[in-house]
Image (cartoon, rainbow, N blue to C red):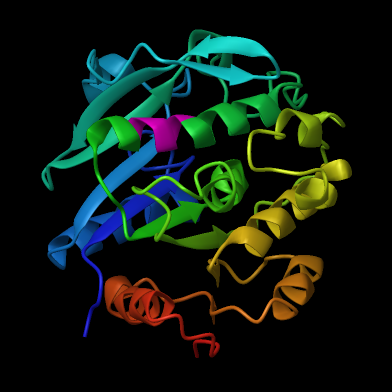
Amino acid sequence: MSNYERVLYVSHEINPYLPENYMSYMGRQLPQEAQDFGKEIRLFMPRFGCVNERRHQLHEVIRLSGMNLIVDDTDHPLIIKVASIQPTRMQVYFIDNEEFFRRKATFWDSEDDFFEDNDERSIFFSRGVFETVKKLGWMPEIIHVNGWFSSLMAVFQKTFYADDPLFADAKVVFSIYGEEFEDSFDPRMWEKMLYDGMTEEDLELIKDPTYTNICKLGAKYADAIVFASEDVNDEIKSFVSTLDKPVLDAQPEENLMSVFDDFYTEVMSDNSVLAE
């Protein structure tokens, strides 16, 4: 029997706002099924420049916008937009910022070069979700982050937001996909993450800021891990096996929420036995 009611879902890909692949399918399907299960959900993604605002009828929420978030000693305005996925009427919140998200691409430019500020974009996005949920005054019991881009939320929840009454007792579930890439992030990424409550030791893993190490860091701070696809690299799987945390392997697309409802319930009960 479920022992939770409120789930915060975060993903950098949600269909129909970005083309369908397995992550964007899961980014929509799992929250939709959770809502159908009677759970109270909130759903967040970045407002990349390739998201068609007119087609999907995005509009700014003035009461949630206007805050400045500091990343690497620079203020960046936080803009919040919303849209609804029909016919489910599932609301999606978009984290936006002129500098970070208006370019017409996600993480690579037209020359296939990795954006140099992808680390700062991830930091801004992760903090932006937390700050927006605070403005909503909503207390998630489970925070389910999907993919590397939102993996830093697990770190922030256990450090910077550890004493925030809205988030202190939440459980973070981190879904890792087979989206590996060879590009590295800014070597100063760990320094940019040194917010209140964090130490250099906490961020040791990303002194070599690769995709694999960022996923390891997210897994280290998450309460549970999902191998969302079968092609997650072996180094990440091996690292996760040392953590003694609940793990869920890739699942068939049918009856997703039945499986995740059991998994969420296990995580909420602090049971460290690995899920089958």
The stretch of residues the image draws in magenta is 128-132
x, y (%) of residue 97? 48, 14
**Is the stretch drawn in magenta largely helix, strand or loop?**
helix
226 up-or-down from 28: above or below:
below
256 up-or-down from 142: above or below:
below
In the image, 170: left or right of 207?
left
Q: Is residue 130 magenta?
A: yes
| Residue at the image position 73 percent from the left and 49 percent from the top | 214
| Residue at the image position 53 percent from the left and 60 percent from the top | 174
x, y (%) of residue 46? 45, 30
Q: Nearer the viewer, residue 88 or 207?
A: 207
In the image, 77: left or right of 137?
right
| Residue at the image position 59 percent from the left and 78 percent from the top | 245
x, y (%) of residue 148? 62, 48
Residue 21: tell me if it is visible. Answer: no
Q: Nearer the viewer, residue 30 or 214?
A: 214
Residue 258: tell me if it is visible. Answer: yes
In the image, 239: left or right of 101?
right
Q: Residue 144 falls in which quadrant of the image?
A: bottom left
In the image, 32: left or right of 134?
left
Q: Residue 236 falls in which quadrant of the image?
A: bottom right
Q: Is residue 121 magenta?
A: no
Q: Nearer the viewer, residue 237 or 190?
A: 190
Q: How many numbered callouts?
A: 0
Q: Nearer the viewer, residue 164 or 83?
A: 164
x, y (%) of residue 81? 29, 21
| Residue at the image position 63 percent from the left and 35 percent from the top | 196
Q: Quadrant of the N terminus?
A: bottom left
